[in-house]
Every structure is written in structure tokens, then in C-alpha cells.
Amino acid sequence: MLVIKRLIDFWASLFGLILLFSLFLVIAVAIKLDSPGPVFFRQERVGKDGRVFKIFKFRTMVVNAEKMGAGVFVEKEDPRITRVGKWLRNTSLDELPQLINVLRGEMSLVGPRPTLPYQVERYDERQRRRLLMSPGITGWAQVNGRNSLTWPEKVELDIWYVEHWSLWLDLKILWKTFFTMFKKEDLYPGLKGDQISGVPFNRDKGGVPM
């Protein structure tokens, strides 16, 4: 069944990149006109079985943003976010370049979201089960609370997905993603504070990885 999942990922991402080519060009021009810097933002993330890869996103922040403010995390009303970047984040269109990662086999359309290397270093044995499946552009946690969830809640949802995975579940998640991608209320965490094995990994007032 995982072979079928990979075939679906390959052909869907290839078709998606071809179909969305014109949209990619429009977004690229908008990013370049809005602020100086590259069109894409790339960052190291951890994938299946702990393999490190570089994720693709449309750049939504000023150049070298990771050296300013909240560092590698993004907060609500973050001043480093560009005008076009705010729109891209609100519509989740900044995630579309990850179709490239899917085509290359580094990601899947559906799976646990890929996390930062230092976060994975803090995983306990149970949390490492997230790495048994390829990370996804969307996932079970994304359609069940997104960034309003605490880290332990996200992990439990991701582990549930890994243990109950099916093609039907993937289709259900993709369907629900369509209706949640334009919702703004779950884009940024509240004041709960995400934790990994009881250790806070972001600023006290919240923040999500760039």
C-alpha cells in the first residue's frame, strides 16, 4: 500500500507542478517586487527515518529573518513578514513549493509535518514514531487544530495517523485540508507553549517554525 501512496505522490505532485506553473510565476514576481531576495526559502527539516532534507517554501519574510526577532520561529503580527508573505501565509500558498519535495521523494502529500533537527533531538522513544512515515504537506494534526494545538497534542495526532494510516485516511485529510487552508484562526499558537518531552522549544508567547 505504501508503494501506491508513493505512486500517487509522484504523479499528483508532477501534475500539480505543471498545473500550477503559471501561479508559481505570478507569486514569484509578486515576491520579487515586494522585497529584495530569493523567491524560495529553504530550511533543513527531518524526514522519514531521521533523514535531513531541505524544505521548499515561497519566501514570506525579509532576507536573513532567522537572525532577527524570534529567530527560526514566526509569531503573530511578526514584523519580519512581508506584505506578500502575509497573504501567502494566510492562504497557505507558501507551502505549494513543497510539491518539489514530494516529487523528489523527501515528502508526501499527507503525513506528519517535518520538524527542525534540534526538535527531533529531544524526541522520546514514542515521539520518534512520527519519523516512521514520510512527512507531509498536510496531515492529521493540520486538519484537527493546526497550530492551536500544543506540541504533545500534535505528536499524539501524528502518531495516531502513523498507526492508523490508510489511503482512505489520506483522502479524508486532503478533503478536509481544502476547507481549512483559508482559515486564519489556527495559523499561530496561543499562549499554551509547545513542548517536547516537557522542554519548551519556542518563545513563551508562541511561534511556529519558519
Image (cartoon, rainbow, N blue to C red):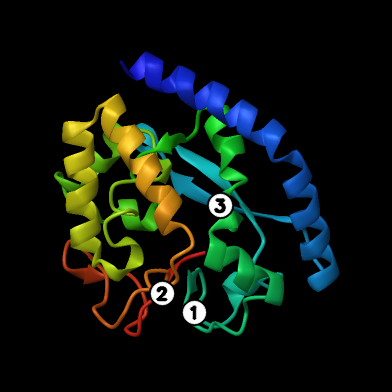
Task: Kindly tell me whether residue 113 is visible in this rendering.
Answer: no
Check residue 70 in the rendering and tell me which mark sits there, or answer none. Answer: 1
Is the N terminus in the top left, top right, bottom left or bottom right quadrant? top left
* Disc 1, SS: loop
The three-letter amino acid code for the residue at tag 1 is Ala
Above or below, comparing residue 6 to residue 69 in the picture: above
- Number of labelled discs? 3
Q: Which residue is mark 2?
A: 207
Distance in Å between CA atoms under marks 2 and 3 = 17 Å
What residue is rendered at 58% in x and 71% in y? 66
Cβ atoms under marks 2 and 1 closer than 8 Å: yes
Sequence-earlier tag: 2 or 3: 3
**Residue 76 placement, left or right of 125:** right
Sequence-earlier tag: 3 or 1: 1
Q: Which residue is mark 3?
A: 95
Residue 185, picture quadrant = bottom left
Distance in Å between CA atoms under marks 3 and 1 = 21 Å
Residue 203, how many percent across, how many down? 37, 80
Q: Nearer the viewer, residue 86 or 121?
A: 86
What residue is rendered at 19% in x and 61% in y? 152
Residue 128, how many percent across, how many down? 23, 43
